[in-house]
Image: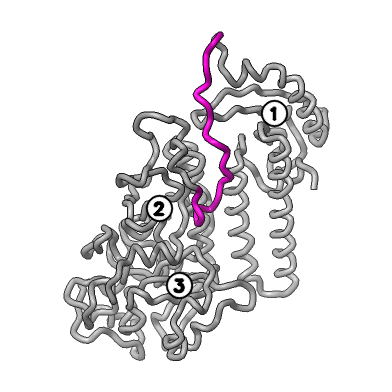
Amino acid sequence: MIPEEAIKILGLPESATSAELSISLKIQQVKFEQNLAHAPTPDLQAKYREALRRLKEAYATLERLREESPLLTLRPDCIGPEGGSPTASANLKLTHDDGRGGEALQIKFPAAWPLKLHWAAAAAVLLFLAGLGGWFFTGRMHGAKSPGAPPAIKPSDGVHAPALSQVAAGGSMAGKSPYPTLTAPYENTLGMKFVPVAGTRVLFGIWDVRVQDFETFVNESRYDATNVMWTYLGGDGLLEHFGDTWRDPDFAQSPTHPVCGVSWQDAQAFCAWLTQKERREGKLNQLQNYRLPTDAEWSVAAGNTKYPWGDQWPPPAGAGNYASGEVAVGDWPTNLPTIQGYLDGYPRTAPVGSFPANRNGLYDMGGNVRQWCQDLYRKEMTSAALRKRYPELNDESGAVEHYRVLRGSSWASSDAETMLSSWRSQTFPGFRVDQLGFRCVLCNIAR
C-alpha cells in the first residue's frame, strides 16, 4: 500500500505522531468491529473484515515509514475533502520532538507532484538537512547545550507500561512535573477524578464514566453509540430495545449518573478520544493514555474483602446500588428476584458517589453498573467450582468475536455469588445492555 492511500484510509489529524496514528487506528477499528458484530449477512461480514484488514495494512505502512525515517511527521493536508484528490500543496514536517514541542522545519511540495514522490524527495532533503544537524538539535545560540530528549519509547496501550521512573514526564528532568503522577490525585478536563491505587501503576477513576462525560465525547467526536440496546426490563428474559440508547435507557438518568448501555468498543473509542484531546491540550504527555483497567488492576482496586462492602451477607444498609426493594417497580420482570429486606433508595441507577467509597477511594466497585475491563476473557479466570455452577462461564468467545471481561455487579444484581468482589462475567465487545458501563484508568504515569 502506498503512503497516500494509507493516509486517506486512516483519516489522520493535521500532524500525526506515532501515538496519534495508533489512536486513529483504534477509533476506526472500533467502528468496523461494531458493524461486523451486527452485520446480518455473510456478505456484509466479509466486507467489514476486508475493511479491517485494509485499515491495519494502512497503519503498518505508515509505521514502517516512520521507523525508516523517525524524524518524519506526516501532514496529510494535501488530501482533499472526503479523502478526494490532492487540492493543495503537501506538507512534510521534520520535527525534533524533545517532549516540549521541539523545533520544526517544514518542507512544502507543489500540489502537482504525486504524493508518492514526496517521500523520495523528503529522503533527499533529509540528507541535505544532515549537515544542519548540529544547529537544529543543539540550539541556535552558539555554545548552547540541548537538555536532551527522553529515550524513545514505543507508545503502548499501557497494559504493560514501560518503566518511566527514569523518564521525566514531558521531557523536564528537574522540578515538578506538569503532568499527572502516581504520587497525587488528578482531575481531568471533564472533571473526572483519578487517584493512585497501591499495588498498581495507574491512576484509577474514582467513579464510573458519567452521562455528562460520555455526552461530551459523542458531541465533539460525532461518534454513534446507539444502534441496539438490550434489557431485562419488561419481559421474562433478555430483550432487544431498538429505541433505547445510552441517552435514554428507558429510565431516568441525570448528567451525573453512570452512562449505561455502552459496549466495550464504545469505551475504547471514548478512551482514545479523551487521550487525544488531553495530549493536544497539553494535559498529558505523549506516553500517557486513558484505557480500561485490566482484570488484575480491577482486582487490586476492589480490595480483599469477600464482597465490596465486607464479608457479611446480606449487604448492610447503604452498601451500594443493587436490586433492592425499590427495583421491583414499573417494568421489573416478575421472575427476577430482589435482595429481601434491602433498600438503597434507587429503583435503577444512582448518581455516582451516592454510596461510600472503598478503602482505595473508589465508588461503585459493586453495584450501579457492571464494568468493562481491557482483557480478553479466559475461562481459567473463574474457579472450576463457579464454572460448574454457571456453565456459561466456560465460553470464551461467540460466533464472531472473543469475549471481554466484565467485573462488578449492577443495580439489577441480587445473587450472593454474582455480587462477590471476585466475580467476573463475559460478553462480546459490541454488546450493549442497560446494566453495563465502564470506568477509566490513566496509565504510563511517572512516579
Residue 410: x %, y % from top left: 34, 73
Q: Determine the secondary structure under disc 3.
A: loop
Residue 3 against residue 299 in the figure, above or below: above
Between label 3 and label 1, give the one nearer the viewer: 1
Residue 16 against residue 1 in the figure, above or below: above
Between label 3 and label 2, give the one nearer the viewer: 2
Q: Which mark is residue 202?
A: 2
Q: Tell me which label, 3 or 2, sits earlier in the chain.
A: 2
- Indicate the amino acid at tag 3: Val
Magenta: predominant secondary structure element? loop
Per the model, the C-alpha gap separating discs 3 and 1 is 45 Å
Residue under the image location 49 percent in, 37 percent down:
280
Residue 219: x %, y % from top left: 47, 49
- Indicate the amino acid at tag 2: Val
The residue beneath circle 3 is 433
Q: Quadrant of the C terminus?
A: top left
Q: Tell me which label, 3 or 1, sits earlier in the chain.
A: 1
Residue reaching furthest front? 166
Is residue 303 toward the left or the right of residue 36 in the image? left
Front-most of 368 and 122?
A: 122
Residue under the image location 29 percent in, 79 percent down:
323
Is residue 202 toward the left or the right of residue 135 in the image? left
Per the model, the C-alpha gap separating discs 3 and 2 is 28 Å
Q: Determine the secondary structure under disc 1.
A: strand
Front-most of 420 and 113?
A: 420
Residue 163: x %, y % from top left: 48, 47
**Quadrant location of residue 317?**
bottom left
Residue 329: x %, y % from top left: 28, 81
Q: Tell me which label, 1 or 2, sits earlier in the chain.
A: 1
Front-most of 412 and 404?
A: 404
**Quadrant location of residue 416?**
bottom left
The residue beneath circle 1 is 91
